[in-house]
Image (spheres, rainbow, N blue to C red):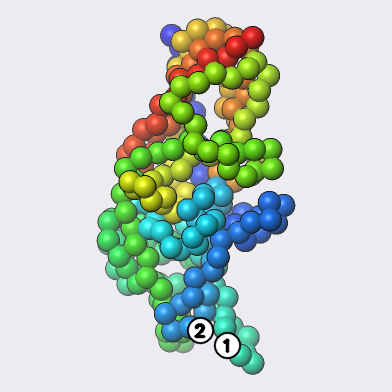
Amino acid sequence: MRWIRLVWLMVPLGLLACGDAGDLGIGPPPSGGSLGRTSVTPECGALNQACLVGGLDAPLARGASLGLGVDYRLAGNSGPPTTLEGVNPAVIDVTDAVVTGRAQGMSGILILDPNRQVVDFIHLWVADATELRVIRHNDDGLPVGAVRSSGTVLAGDEIILSLEAFNGTQGLLGLFETVWQIEVLEGEEPIAIVEDIVFGWFRLIARGPGKVRLTADALGQQKTIELEVLP
């Protein structure tokens, strides 16, 4: 048996905001601030389904990061330059416009103007991931469903996948570091995994006959899949 170890860091640089996923015709709904002066949109990046469907209506995974975009609802006025600040840094770290979950719990996030006056605020929960799921997407990037723990593919197949975190039945928000291990059980490197140009996706390429065991390690959880590549 041979091991191939891939380390991928999905850094939340805000390079692909979900609201900009125009090619897919999808994007996350904005969440209104508690004072009604702003709307806050998460930059999903990895096209995480919890993020796309619910916006900020799900917890952030502990150890994951998420960029936030702020739009103003001030009639007759343009929005001032703003900064974000976490109320409880033990739970949420806020650097520039990126929030990172540090511990389980809840924290307010203040939206401040240049004079450090509170324009609006939101609350964000942080929860531990209890499960990882590998999600298959079609050629248009739309989710097909969760990948089973074992299965078969044909040599020459190219499959778009993403890794998503869950707490029980609830999908979690955020981008996170992922370590992939490919254990070759039979054949000559029958499968390759290539990071896609779309942030947070990767492509599974079936090269030739054989068997592999794929293990994703992230957020303190593991997900293992065994695949056989048929001729």
- Assign a secondary structure to mark 2: loop
Q: Quadrant of the N terminus?
A: top left
Circle 1: residue type: Leu
**Callout 1: 10 Å neighbours few (<14), some, many (20+)?**
few
Circle 2: residue type: Arg
Q: List x then y, in percent, for residue 23.
A: 72, 52
**Callout 2: 10 Å neighbours few (<14), some, many (20+)?**
some
Q: Relative to the observer, which residue lies in front, 128 or 194?
A: 128
- Identify the residue under disc 1: 74
Q: Are marks 2 and 1 in contact (CB under 8 Å)?
A: yes
Q: List x then y, in percent, for residue 111.
A: 45, 77
In the image, residue 133 sits, relative to residue 117, either above or below, namely above
At 62% across and 54% down in the image, what residue appears? Answer: 16
- Assign a secondary structure to mark 1: loop
At 44% across and 84% down in the image, what residue appears? Answer: 35
At 32% across and 39% down in the image, what residue appears? Answer: 220
In the image, residue 215 sits, relative to residue 136, either above or below, namely above
Q: Relative to the observer, which residue lies in front, 146 or 109?
A: 146
Q: List x then y, in percent, for residue 56.
A: 46, 63
- Identify the residue under disc 2: 37
Q: List x then y, in percent, for residue 94.
A: 41, 64
Q: Earlier in the sequence, mark 2 or mark 1?
A: 2
In the image, residue 176 sits, relative to residue 18, either above or below, namely above
Structural distance between the alpha carbons of marks 2 and 1: 6 Å
At 61% across and 35% down in the image, what residue appears? Answer: 160
